Image (spheres, rainbow, N blue to C red):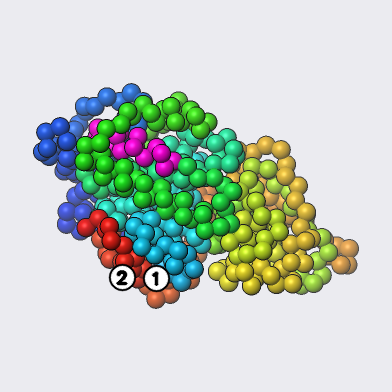
Amino acid sequence: MTDGAGGLPKVVFTGDEAASSTGEAVQMRDSSIGGLLAEPAGMTAATEGTANRLAAWAFRLTPSPDDLALAGRALADTLAVTLAARTDPIRAVLAGEPEALQWAALGHVLDFDDLHMPSTTHISVVCVPTVLACGGDARAYLAGAGVMARLGTALGWPHYTAGWHATCTAGAQAAAVAAGVALRLSETELATAIALALPAAGGVQRAFGAHAKSLQVGFAAHAGIRAARLAAAGATADPLAVDQWLRLVGGDPERLDTGGPAVPDGLAIKIFPCCYAMQRPIAAIQDLVGDGLAVERITRIRVSTPKATIAPLIHDRPTTGLQAKFSLPYAIAAALLDGHPGFASFTDAAVQRPAARRLVDMVEVSALPGGDGLLAGEVHIEVDLDDGTSRTVTLDQPPGAPARPPTAEQLAAKLADCAPDAHHQLTDLTWEAARELLRTAVPTHASNRMD
């Protein structure tokens, strides 16, 4: 089933799930009296400070139809990329870990999951596994996703360029909210859970190109669940600790904005299974090649792009498939050799191809000053040929970007590539069915499931 907007999958709600997901008649537990309170119409808790403001926003969230459509797309996309990683070697590393940690790490290891551009965070790969592990629904996802988007934006681009992995620094607190809403914590408990998640708010970009990148995403999801459960059990924390932490890591509480849709500016969907910073150069090469180009005729490749847009691309000469997902020269090589770089393009063997190594060595990168995000400015590529001619291309928005949403065909192709045996199920899925699908297709054998 689709939502009518370009064939994008829509989530389906039934019974009690439908009521809680639309924010109607939501009941939350209030630890001070041990009973159930209907969601309050006005402010009933202190709202000073970042944690209290985010908790109040999440507690009162009433998703709009557009919010719910976004949640449905995020669910389908995240399940698809998680199922695609079923045979990845990281599964052996994850054996015995909690299921939310396993699902989040698997969902991120291929680097094919969605991205929130203003915060530079992979929202869904943290929030979807957290919600599914806690038995939550679209409203719990949107609460966590909205917190992650806002907190990540308050951290800002300087936080990312300093070397932090913002998905993890903002993800632990977001997972605490997603889990907390799924577990029906009170507003006060949500603020406490955010503060309790702070010790796990870490992760750096030097991890990119190794298992550590996806593992630290899994750590964030698990830490959020742990924080929510501790808050529910009565653990205490000072919510103002979040403001202190935010300033210590270069963020600004004044940038926090709780207005707008659940996830401001929407989510970017990846078309290629690699770092988002490579989506635009790959798409540009596809435009340049057009009907074809014999790679043996290429003598030189020049790329110019704002420095900000290649911040996470730390492997100029990759030697493994994981490193190649963070390599601008390899992005160019793979696009020239493979046309549409897919899973097979990012294996160790593919990286070691003589033709790929030859092209990688030809790439010259000019990092232009400025920029404040992965899609700042535009990328310009010039390819010189052996007859003295050259081809050039310039691109600002790749397919899948919020300003250039993926087509229905692109989405369908992605789901089919990721889960050829289950892609039809992904477009018409409840959150409960999604949880059971993951538990069947990707059994974790974890001993500390939430149910």
Q: Quadrant of residue 34?
A: top left
In the rendered view, tell whether residue 21 sits above or below residue 61.
below
Label 1 element class: helix
Residue at 48% x, 55% y is: 214
Other residues around mark 1 within 10 Å, as few (<14) / some (14–19) / many (≥20):
many
Q: Nearer the viewer, residue 51 or 266?
A: 51
Does the magenta run of residues contain 217?
Answer: no
Measuring from the top left, give residue 139's x and y in whole percent.
Answer: 28, 47
Callout in the foreground (1, 2): 2
Q: Is 19 displayed left or right of 255 in the figure?
A: left
Identify the residue at horizontal 49%, vertical 29% (top origin): 248
Secondary-structure class at tag 2? helix
Q: Position of residue 272 (x, y in %)?
A: 56, 62
Quadrant location of the N terminus? bottom left
Say the numbered circle drawn on residue 409.
none
- 444 in relation to 228, above or below: below
The span picked out in magenta is 187-201
x, y (%) of residue 337? Answer: 69, 70
Task: Please tell me whether residue 199 belongs to the stretch shown in magenta.
Answer: yes
Structural distance between the alpha carbons of marks 1 and 2: 15 Å
Task: Tell me which corner region of the image, top left, top right, bottom left or bottom right, holds residue 296.
Answer: bottom right
Q: Main secondary structure of the magenta part?
A: helix
- Note whether 90 is above or below 309 in the view shown: below
The disc placed on residue 440 is 2
The quadrant holding residue 438 is bottom left
The image shows residue 30 at horizontal and vertical percentages of 16, 36
Query: In the picture, which quadrant includes the C terminus?
Result: bottom left
Residue 423: which numbered mark, if any? 1
Type of residue at label 1? His
